[in-house]
Amino acid sequence: MMNAHVVPFPTRKAPAPLHRASLDGEFYEDDLPPELFDEDEDRDDLVTYIQIAEHVED
């Protein structure tokens, strides 16, 4: 007489949780948060970074 083994079906894995980024207490379901650079607010910083990059290349 053969011994029969019952093989259980694999259970479904729970879906992986989405990466949640918190910006100012707001949560976003996407992997990337919304655009962080506000051109009007950050123009002075951008100009400074461009000037630094130009001097580094020299």
Image (cartoon, grey):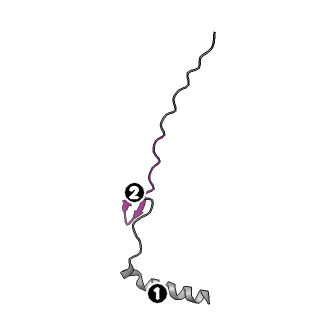
Q: Which residues are magenta?
A: 13-30
State the residue at coordinates (46%, 87%): 47
State the residue at coordinates (41%, 84%): 43
Crowd class of label 1 (few under 14; some 14 to 19; many from 20; radius 10 Å): few
Give residue 3's position: percent from left, percent from top: 62, 15
Dominant secondary structure of the residues highlighted in magenta in the image: loop
Query: Label 2 belongs to which residue?
Result: 29
Q: Which mark is residue 47?
A: 1
State the residue at coordinates (46%, 83%): 46
Which image quarter holds the N terminus?
Answer: top right
Residue 41, quarter of picture: bottom left
The amino acid type of the residue labelled 1 equals: Val
The local secondary structure at tag 1 comes to helix
Give residue 38's position: percent from left, percent from top: 38, 77
Placement of 2 over or under 44, stated as above or below: above
- In the image, 56: left or right of 26? right
Placement of 18 over or under 24, stated as above or below: above
Which of the two residues, 15 or 45, is positioned nearer the viewer here?
15
Which image quarter holds the C terminus?
Answer: bottom right
Give residue 35's position: percent from left, percent from top: 40, 70
- In the image, 12: left or right of 58? left
Q: How far separated are the C-alphas under marks 1 and 2?
A: 32 Å
